Image (cartoon, helix red, strand yellow):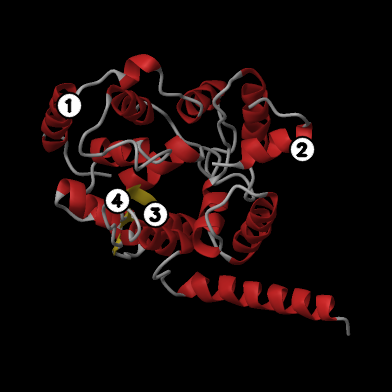
């Protein structure tokens, strides 16, 4: 048997076994955690790894709904890829300098757990491969559980449990809709956007997330308004007026948000070809 075939078989078998393994076992660390923590050793400030795994039942429904509203409104309907969102992103990227992605929660989970941080063709191809695997072997509940436990919500902060404890001094199970939506609002760039010092842009995203519906297994037909609301959140870009916030306005925003959540009851480059455009659209 040729060496290349043996290598391919080893890769397929090991990847399938790893996906099956993490169907039952909590993910302790991810490549992104190690990469960022190691890279920070050579920077001005070391960034550790703050990560606490909790089962899905210990994450509030509000938090689960918020990330679906913000990142993947068809999560319970698709099989790993939202082709409507991909097409929308391709069209958007043809006429906008700043590119946007249309990765689903399943794709983001596959990337975060099994792959290294990169935007190369090889990594994107492997992302598709692992997305197919987790959609086949895992349930939707397991995918959202892993996603919520490994996403980066701040510098060195991974998972909504660590985020809830850090920013709101409470477990993820007690996050209300305002707090959950604020965490979901920073996910496009949790290093630039701050949960504890939200800009006007972040607060705008939070309001949109709060006012958006989601598609569930019990509602397979998504209303046109719901689709429009999701794209309005997913493709929302920070403009110059958003960047003009100073420290005082951020402080006021934080105080206002904190006050609001206290009163809330805990609850429930143009692309040269279609192929390269699709890679941009798939990237998150």
Q: Residue 116: horizontal and vertical position, in percent? A: 54, 59
Determine which residue is flagged by label 3. Answer: 148
Determine which residue is flagged by label 2. Answer: 275
Q: Is residue 82 visible?
A: no
Residue sticking out furthest to the right: 1
Q: CA distance from mark 1 to mark 3?
A: 30 Å
Determine which residue is flagged by label 4. Answer: 60
Q: CA distance from mark 4 to mark 3?
A: 11 Å
Q: Is residue 136 visible?
A: yes
Quarter occupied by residue 194: top left
Q: Residue at x 72, y 37 (%)?
A: 276
Q: Are marks 1 and 2 in contact (CB under 8 Å)?
A: no
The quarter in which the C terminus is drawn is top right
Q: Are marks 2 and 3 in contact (CB under 8 Å)?
A: no
Q: CA distance from mark 2 to mark 3?
A: 31 Å
For the residue carrying disc 2, how many other residues have a C-alpha within 10 Å: few (<14), some (14-19), or many (20+)? few
Q: Secondary structure at mark 1?
A: helix
Task: Pick whichever of labels 1 and 4 is earlier in the sequence.
Answer: 4
Closer to viewer: mark 1 or mark 4: 1
Q: Residue 184: horizontal and vertical position, in percent? A: 36, 40
Locate residue 112 relative to residue 158 in the image: left or right: right
Q: Is residue 68 above or below residue 243?
A: below
Closer to viewer: mark 2 or mark 4: 2
């Amino acid at each position: 048997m040729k060496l290349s075939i043996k290598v391919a078989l080893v890769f397929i078998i090991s990847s399938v076994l790893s996906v099956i393994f993490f169907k039952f076992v909590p993910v302790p660390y991810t490549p992104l955690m190690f990469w960022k923590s190691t890279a920070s050793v050579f920077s001005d400030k070391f960034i550790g790894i703050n990560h606490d795994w909790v089962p899905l039942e210990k994450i509030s429904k509000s938090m689960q709904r918020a990330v679906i509203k913000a990142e993947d409104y068809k999560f319970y309907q698709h099989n790993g890829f939202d082709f409507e969102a991909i097409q929308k992103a391709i069209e958007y990227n043809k006429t906008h300098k700043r590119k946007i992605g249309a990765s689903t929660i399943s794709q983001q989970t596959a990337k975060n757990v099994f792959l290294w941080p990169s935007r190369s063709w090889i990594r994107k191809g492997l992302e598709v491969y692992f997305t197919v695997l987790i959609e086949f072997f895992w349930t939707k509940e397991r995918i959202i559980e892993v996603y919520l436990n490994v996403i980066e919500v701040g510098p060195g902060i991974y998972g909504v449990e660590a985020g809830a404890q850090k920013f709101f001094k409470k477990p993820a199970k007690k996050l209300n809709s305002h707090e959950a939506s604020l965490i979901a609002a920073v996910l496009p760039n949790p290093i630039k956007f701050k949960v504890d010092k939200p800009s006007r842009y972040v607060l705008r995203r939070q309001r949109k997330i709060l006012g958006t519906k989601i598609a569930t297994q019990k509602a397979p037909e998504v209303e046109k308004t719901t689709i429009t609301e999701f794209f309005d959140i997913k493709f929302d870009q920070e403009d110059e007026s958003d960047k003009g916030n100073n420290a005082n306005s951020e402080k006021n925003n934080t105080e206002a948000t904190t006050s609001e959540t206290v009163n809330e009851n805990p609850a429930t480059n143009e692309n040269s070809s279609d192929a390269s455009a699709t890679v941009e659209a798939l990237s998150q």
